[in-house]
Image (cartoon, helix red, strand yellow):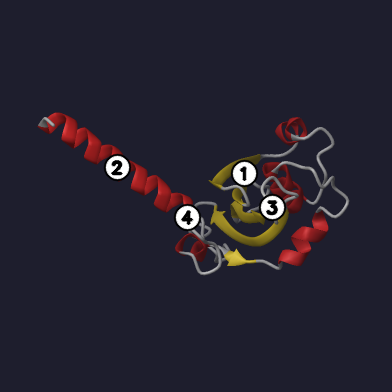
Amino acid sequence: MDRRRESGMRWRLAAAALLLAGAAWAGPAGAQETETYRSEPVEDYRANRADCPEDSTPVLVAYQAVAARCAPDGMHFIARHGRYELTERVRAADRRVILVTQRDLADDSLRDMRHYVELAADEAGGPWRVNWVGVAWRCWPGRGHQEFAPQSCL
């Protein structure tokens, strides 16, 4: 086998190992990523979506839990109402992590709020339930930290 081909094969094996390691990440409680979030009572977020359909997608379940409302026509409703950004961070058959970020809040010190919502399903495909929620804030300039952190703003 020539050097170029051998080098390419090593690179592909290393990339595959990294992908497999990332897919096996177990988070959240105690995970390094969640240290920047303050843990919230998960029961409150479960209650927020008590009247919502069970067959909702993971991203929609996270939004419903944070916004405390069922989105009648799903993501179209979210796009039209509020300043929410929804980002899927972990995607596995029985586990999802969704970041729900509210931008430019009408508050004199609090600029943005981000919820780290971990969802779990007993079987692949759902139904999805809220498993863990953390919250972090970013402050307006002169009112505290400029990065998302679990401490309140001034």
For label 2, the SS is: helix
Earlier sequence position, callout 1 versus callout 3:
1
Q: Quadrant of residue 81?
A: top right
Earlier sequence position, callout 3 versus callout 2:
2
For label 1, the SS is: loop
Which label sits in the foreground, 1 or 4?
4
Question: Mark 3 sits on what residue?
Answer: 123
Question: Mark 1 sits on what residue?
Answer: 104
Query: What amino acid is found at the position of numbered circle 2 in the picture?
Result: Leu
**Inter-mark Cα distance, 3 to 2:** 30 Å
Q: Position of residue 98 (x, y in %)?
A: 61, 48
Q: Is residue 115 left or right of residue 9?
A: right
Q: Number of numbered discs present?
A: 4
Query: 10 Å neighbourhood of mark 3: few (<14), some, or many (≥20)?
Result: few
- Give the label on residue 13, or none: 2
Query: 10 Å neighbourhood of mark 1: few (<14), some, or many (≥20)?
Result: some
Q: Is residue 154 visible from the viewing direction of this image?
A: no
**Inter-mark Cα distance, 4 to 3:** 17 Å
For label 4, the SS is: loop
Camera-side residue of 41 and 18? 18
Which quadrant does the C terminus fall into?
bottom right
Query: 10 Å neighbourhood of mark 4: few (<14), some, or many (≥20)?
Result: few
Query: What amino acid is found at the position of numbered circle 1 in the picture?
Result: Asp
Question: Mark 4 sits on what residue?
Answer: 24
Earlier sequence position, callout 2 versus callout 4:
2
Residue at coordinates 81% horizontally, 56% vertically from top-left? 48
Which label sits in the foreground, 4 or 3?
3
